[in-house]
Structure formats: structure tokens, C-alpha cells
């Protein structure tokens, strides 16, 4: 990419490399909404600037791994439309993309820090560390390591190593701290050595802790920007010290504020309704979920809803991300209701088809309702009225999949001219006229009404409502009573424009 710096000489182009960002979850659980937002903001930042979005799995905490979580995380990113450019599944030039497969790199970095005196071996047993923790808690202090092994003489260290005493590697925190500029929180400074003991960077089992692993991986994967949760803001001082000690250039940091529940409480993995997989199972549309988490988390010039993914990429502005926590109101999912772009509808069509077969399979008499063209039409015309595919499976929308049972007598009770209305609509739809929009069809229906003797437009709508759905009321969503006529027109357009045998024609011939 090529950008012109302000103040540069006219005609001089300063080239900067495209950014590389990473989403680095731990597969100790499945992807939840907070993680989805972090991944999304990384994706938006990279795509806006022609960069790369990396998925890196930080699986060094071996005791908490959840079987299947690693694959499920990438599955959910792909479902949401923000698939990584590089990952264990997709490959890339900077793999492996799973930390447990990168252990030699961490050992090399730890050895370098030991050699330069920035790290030391710690031989303290777990029992001693537990005792320090309990004593601190009893006295009301924050637990911290007392840096005891930092004081060992070289000969003491060699003697313990020769005896094979289990050891970890700790990093020496420098007193004081240089301020650094966070892309969201601005200039900040944390004197971690004043409140924390020297952190373990390589455990006795040879696995790194997060502090070393993320620094080593960000360097070797050439990560240019780190967008992560604000819970890591204080730890950034340690990470910058590690970068300096290893003589590496650190990335630019941007810490995203926490995503909280509407009441201000922290999102918890114990909440069953925060996992992305749960929303998918409920039929929530992917871009609906992306829209609501970005709406809650700022990062845009305005706070409107209804952005598609390409609009999110185009309009994202990291300087607009607020420093205060973002409140997520899942009760507003209905306001973020839209169907995805055409190129992403294939997966939705397949998913909806499977739902229809499972829910209505034995009742479907016209297999044309399972054809991609028809399902696509349903999705297009229901756009703006649903936020979940499962909504299309309830009794209100049963007419889309099952031929309704309506008698002539029922229709005549609505209007004495019911048979004339049905016949006129059938002639209209069979005439070959190009009716591709609800506006055009609505105009044609009004023309039919003008030729009737004793039926108003509202009466025509009541007849069509009953004939199409076997329902007296067509209230498919909140506040729909005054909009029910447009719903009827959309339903009629769906049935006639996409299905070889339609409800009205079948009824007219067989009753």
C-alpha cells in the first residue's frame, strides 16, 4: 500500500507495509461475543488497509484445553464471514499457527534472555509459591512473588541445575516504566515492578506463559498491530520490556474496552447465551451478530444500524473506539435484522432448507419449495422482517412451505366476490407480465380492485391473506397490523414468482 504523509514533498510517496494483525484465542472454550468482537475489529482493521488477518491458537495452558474448541473457533469465524487469511487450517508463511507446535522458538528466546541477564532460573516449589500466596491474602496484600531466586549466586544455580531440580524461567522486571502510546487509550504508564513480582515466562514443563509466547509469536509472525481486550493493558508494560530485552521492535498496541452485559456485568462463559455457536443454532444471521457487536462497541463515525460487512470494513475508524466499556443489549437483536449479501446467501439457503425439511418435511407436498431459487426469493422478501432463520419455520410462515387448506365457503365469508378476486389474480400471474417488485404487484392489485363491483382494496387483501396463509391475521412481526398489506403482497410475489404450482391456482382447480 502507498500512503502520502502529511508534510511530505509533493509527488513523494512514502511506502508502508500492509498491516498484519492477529486474533489469538485460547481453545479453553468456544468463541463468545467478546471474542467475536475482538476478531472482527482485527479483521476490519486489516481489510481496510489491505493487510492480513491471522488466527493463532494459544494452547499453552494444557490443563484447560477443551476438545474440539480449536476447530469450533475457526468454524465460527468462517460462519460469521470473517475467515482468517492465515491459520492452522489455511496455512501461511509464518506457521505453525498453534503455540504448542512452536516450543523451540520460546526456548530459544528464554535462553537468549538468560544469557543477557534479563531472566533467571527459579527453583521455588509449588508449595512455597502457594504459601507466599496464602500469607499475602491473610495480610490483605496482593499476592506477588518475592524474587527470591533472583538473588542466587551463579554457583548455586549451577549446583541446582546439576542436581536436576525442577526450574522455571522468570523475567527480570525493570524498576520504573516508560510510558507508551496506546492507539485507543492514548499515553499510559504502568510500573508493574512496583506491584508485581518477576513473572514466569517459561514453565518447568517447557511451555511458555502468555507473556513470553505472545511477544515471540508477534515478532516471528511480523505482527504490526495488536488489537486485544483492555484487560491486557497493564501487562503491556511487561511485554514492552520483553521486546526491549530481546532487541525486537514492538507492534502498535490498541486495547479494546470490555464488552459487558446491558446491566454492566461482565460477559461470562457460564452464560449459555453469549456463545456464537448458540446464536447460529438459533438461526441468527451472521451479519446481524456482527452489526450488533459493532454497534455496542463504537469505532464508527455514526451509530447507525444496518451495516453490511463491506460497509463495516469501509467505515471502521479505530480512532473512534471509545475507552469506556461497551454495553451489549441482546434484546435489540430484532432491530438488527437483515439478510446477508448475495455471495453469502448460498450457505443460508442450505441451512434454511435443512431446517424446513426437519420441521415440515412430512407435510411438504410441493418439492419446489426446497429449490434454491425459491428459498432465495423467500430470504430476499423477508429481508428486514426477520433476524433468525428459525422465524421462517413457525406457524406464521408455514404458508411458505405447506399448501394451506382453505375452502371456497371460507373465502366467500370474507367477500362475496372471492371467486372473482381469485380468478383475476390467477389471470394476472399467468399472463406472463413482468412483475418483479412488490410496488408493481401492489399497483396491479389495485387495478383489479377498481374493476370489482362491491369490494374495496382492503377486502381484496383479506381474501388473499386467507387464501395464501389460511390465516385471518398476517401479523408476522411487531407492529405489523398497519403493514400487513405489504406482507400479503410480498407473500403473493414469493408464491407466484418462484413456485411452479401456486396456492391460488391449486385452490381454483381443485375446490
Image: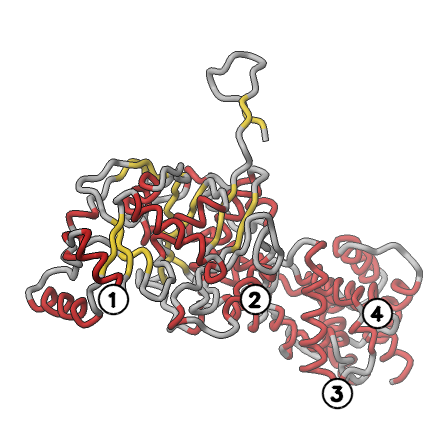
Relative side of 246 to 486, left or right: left
Residue at the far right in the pictured view: 431
Q: Secondary structure at mark 2?
A: loop
Most foreground residue, 315 or 339: 315
Most foreground residue, 403 or 166: 166
Among the 4 quarters of the image, the one containing residue 452: bottom right
**2 or 3: tag closer to the N-terminus:** 2
Q: Secondary structure at mark 1?
A: loop
Q: Residue sitting at 46 percent across and 59 percent down?
A: 99
Q: Which residue is mark 4?
A: 499
Q: Residue sitting at 54 percent across and 43 percent down?
A: 46
Q: Which residue is mark 1?
A: 163
Q: Give the number of the mark in front: 3 or 4.
A: 3
Most foreground residue, 229 or 19: 19
- The CA distance from mark 4 to mark 2 is 26 Å
Q: Which mark is residue 362?
A: 3
Measured from the top left, where is residue 57 in percent x and y? 48, 60
Q: Residue sitting at 87 percent across and 78 percent down?
A: 506
Q: Secondary structure at mark 3?
A: helix
State yes or no: discs 1 and 2 in contact (Cβ < 8 Å).
Answer: no
Residue 196 appears in the rendering: no
Q: Give the number of the mark in front: 1 or 4.
A: 1
**3 or 4: tag closer to the N-terminus:** 3
Q: Which residue is mark 2?
A: 284
Is residue 46 shown above or below 352?
above
- The CA distance from mark 1 to mark 4 is 81 Å
**How many residues crowd mark 3 within 10 Å: few (<14), some (14–19), many (20+)?**
few
**4 or 2: tag closer to the N-terminus:** 2
- The CA distance from mark 3 to mark 4 is 19 Å
Amino acid at each position: 500500500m502507498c500512503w502520502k504523509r502529511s508534510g511530505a514533498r509533493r509527488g513523494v510517496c512514502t511506502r508502508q507495509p500492509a498491516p498484519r494483525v492477529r486474533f489469538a484465542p485460547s481453545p479453553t472454550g468456544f468463541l463468545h461475543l467478546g471474542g467475536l468482537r475482538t476478531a472482527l475489529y482485527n479483521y476490519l482493521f486489516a481489510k481496510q488497509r489491505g493487510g492480513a488477518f491471522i488466527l493463532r491458537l494459544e494452547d499453552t495452558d494444557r490443563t484447560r484445553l477443551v476438545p474440539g474448541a480449536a476447530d469450533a473457533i475457526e468454524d465460527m469465524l468462517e460462519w460469521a464471514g470473517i475467515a482468517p487469511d492465515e491459520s492452522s487450517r489455511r496455512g501461511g508463511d509464518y506457521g505453525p499457527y498453534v503455540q504448542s507446535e512452536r516450543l523451540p522458538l520460546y526456548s530459544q528466546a528464554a535462553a537468549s534472555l538468560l544469557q543477557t541477564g534479563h531472566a533467571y532460573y527459579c527453583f521455588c516449589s509449588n508449595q512455597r509459591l502457594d504459601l507466599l500466596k496464602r500469607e499475602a491474602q491473610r495480610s490483605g496484600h496482593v499476592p506477588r512473588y518475592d524474587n527470591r531466586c533472583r538473588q542466587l549466586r551463579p554457583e548455586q544455580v549451577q549446583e541446582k541445575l546439576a542436581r536436576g531440580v525442577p526450574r522455571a524461567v522468570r523475567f527480570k522486571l525493570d524498576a520504573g516504566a516508560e510510558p507508551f502510546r496506546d492507539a485507543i487509550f492514548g499515553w499510559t504508564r504502568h510500573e508493574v515492578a512496583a506491584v508485581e513480582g518477576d513473572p514466569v515466562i517459561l514453565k518447568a514443563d517447557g511451555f511458555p506463559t502468555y507473556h513470553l509466547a505472545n511477544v515471540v509469536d508477534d515478532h516471528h509472525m511480523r505482527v504490526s498491530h495488536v488489537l486485544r481486550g483492555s484487560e491486557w493493558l497493564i501487562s503491556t508494560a511487561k511485554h514492552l520490556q520483553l521486546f526491549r530485552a530481546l532487541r525486537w521492535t514492538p507492534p502498535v498496541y490498541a486495547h479494546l474496552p470490555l464488552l459487558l452485559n446491558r446491566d454492566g456485568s461482565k460477559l461470562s462463559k457460564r452464560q449459555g447465551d453469549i456463545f456464537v455457536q448458540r446464536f447460529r443454532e438459533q438461526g441468527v444471521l451472521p451479519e446481524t451478530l456482527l452489526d450488533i457487536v459493532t454497534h455496542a462497541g463504537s469505532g464508527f463515525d455514526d451509530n447507525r444500524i444496518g451495516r453490511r460487512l463491506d460497509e463495516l470494513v469501509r467505515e471502521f475508524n479505530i480512532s473512534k473506539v471509545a475507552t469506556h466499556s461497551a454495553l451489549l443489549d441482546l434484546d435489540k437483536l430484532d432491530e438488527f435484522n437483515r439478510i446477508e449479501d448475495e455471495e453469502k446467501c448460498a450457505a443460508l439457503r442450505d441451512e434454511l432448507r435443512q431446517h424446513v425439511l426437519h420441521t415440515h418435511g412430512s407435510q411438504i407436498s410441493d418439492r419446489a419449495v426446497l429449490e434454491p431459487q425459491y428459498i432465495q426469493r423467500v430470504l430476499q422478501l423477508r429481508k428486514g422482517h426477520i433476524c433468525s432463520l428459525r422465524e421462517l419455520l413457525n406457524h406464521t410462515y408455514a404458508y411458505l412451505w405447506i399448501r394451506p387448506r382453505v375452502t371456497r365457503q371460507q373465502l366467500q365469508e370474507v367477500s362475496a366476490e372471492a371467486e372473482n378476486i381469485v380468478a383475476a389474480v390467477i389471470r394476472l400471474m399467468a399472463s406472463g407480465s413482468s412483475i418483479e417488485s412488490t410496488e408493481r404487484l401492489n399497483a396491479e392489485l389495485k387495478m383489479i380492485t377498481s374493476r370489482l363491483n362491491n369490494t374495496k382494496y382492503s377486502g381484496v387483501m383479506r381474501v388473499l391473506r386467507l387464501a395464501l396463509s389460511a390465516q385471518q391475521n398476517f401479523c408476522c412481526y411487531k407492529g405489523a397490523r398497519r403493514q400487513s398489506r405489504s406482507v400479503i403482497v410480498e407473500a403473493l410475489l414469493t408464491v407466484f414468482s418462484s413456485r411452479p404450482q401456486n396456492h391460488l391456482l391449486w385452490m381454483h382447480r381443485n375446490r
